[in-house]
């Protein structure tokens, strides 16, 4: 929505350390121009957000405005997971629940605040508005050759480890996909290296782009080839849902996210704050 995208522009400009009133005004002006153009060209919110981010990076000269935000998010997430003792969560449903609770992290929300509710939610049990976990379980039993795991927020990756390892143990090839360049507070190779998570994710690929969600127009050929040759995609977060759900892709996609905004609430008729575990068949099954 327009209000969210304007708020995003202001937040990114502030995180980039732009205290020059001239830069702030230019950022607001270019954001308005992008929003007006988006309405004419029927662009989705993740496409508009990517354009806004790129322009603010250009104006401020800051390549990764969310760099320190991501560091804080990862430190807090690692500490919380140590308290939860997630090693006890071994079944698929438990692994999915832990992964989806990690999606409570958000670039608009303080990481400590977002993480504080997770232990109680995990203990109470996650209730899904759409629950296709059984379909995921049935598919994994077939021992797929290649599964792509599309990551989302940087701190969220700690909540993904259990599910990724569950899939990795049952698929011939499991690949974690990160952003090719900084995009909001999303995971990149730099954050994986910072957190020293190489032992957990043996195979890592990237989108080749700084686009929010999946930027199909600017994604690398290597990434597009991976998508076309995979048997299953696990897609975390609303931006990945927005980018992939309307598109026809070869493999089936299992979407995992928390509904955080009115447009998504209206689009899938799911309450704000609800959890979504949604299966979509691939074009090869059509």
Image (tube, grey):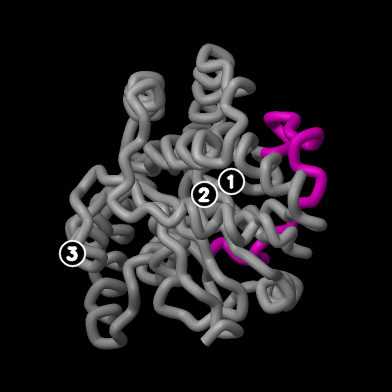
For label 1, the residue is 187
Question: Which quadrant holds the N terminus?
Answer: bottom left
Residue at 49% across, 53% down: 134
Q: Is residue 279 left or right of residue 192?
A: left
Q: Is residue 182 visible?
A: yes
Q: Is residue 58 visible?
A: no
Disc 2: CA contacts within 10 A as few (<14), some (14-19) or many (>=20): many
Q: Label for residue 152?
A: 2
Disc 3: CA contacts within 10 A as few (<14), some (14-19) or many (>=20): few
Query: Is residue 206 located in the magenta-colored stretch of the structure?
Result: yes
State the predominant SS element of the stretch in magenta: loop
Mark with earlier residue (1, 3)? 1
Label 1 near label 2: C-beta < 8 Å? yes
Marks 2 and 3 sit apart, C-alpha to C-alpha, by 22 Å
Residue 153 at what x, y percent from top left? 50, 44
The boundaries of the magenta stretch are: 192-211
Q: In front here: 76 or 236? A: 236
Residue 40 at what x, y percent from top left? 24, 87
Disc 1: CA contacts within 10 A as few (<14), some (14-19) or many (>=20): many
Mark count: 3
For label 3, the residue is 266
- Residue 104 is drawn in which quadrant? top left
């Amino acid at each position: 929505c327009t209000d969210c995208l304007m708020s995003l522009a202001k937040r990114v400009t502030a995180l980039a350390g732009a205290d020059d009133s001239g830069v702030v005004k230019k950022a607001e002006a270019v954001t308005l121009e992008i929003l007006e153009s988006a309405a004419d060209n029927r662009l989705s919110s993740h496409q508009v957000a990517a354009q806004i981010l790129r322009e603010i990076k250009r104006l401020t000269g800051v390549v990764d405005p969310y760099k320190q935000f991501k560091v804080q998010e990862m430190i807090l997430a690692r500490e919380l997971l140590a308290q939860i003792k997630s090693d006890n969560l071994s079944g698929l449903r438990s692994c999915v629940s832990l992964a989806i609770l990690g999606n409570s992290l958000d670039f608009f929300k303080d990481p400590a605040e977002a993480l504080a509710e997770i232990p109680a939610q995990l203990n109470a049990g996650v209730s899904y508005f759409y629950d296709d976990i059984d379909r995921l379980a049935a598919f994994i039993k077939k021992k797929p050759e290649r599964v792509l795991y599309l990551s989302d927020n940087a701190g969220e990756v700690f909540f993904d480890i259990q599910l990724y390892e569950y899939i990795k143990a049952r698929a011939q090839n499991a690949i974690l996909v990160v952003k090719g360049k900084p995009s909001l507070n999303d995971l990149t190779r730099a954050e994986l290296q910072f957190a020293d998570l190489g032992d957990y994710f043996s195979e890592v690929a990237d989108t080749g782009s700084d686009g929010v969600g999946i930027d199909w127009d600017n994604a690398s050929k290597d990434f597009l080839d991976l998508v076309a040759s995979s048997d299953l995609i696990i897609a975390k977060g609303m931006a990945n849902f927005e980018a992939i759900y309307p598109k026809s892709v070869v493999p089936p996609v299992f979407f995992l996210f928390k509904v955080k905004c009115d447009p998504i609430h209206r689009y899938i008729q799911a309450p704000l704050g609800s959890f979504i575990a949604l299966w979509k068949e691939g074009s090869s099954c059509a």
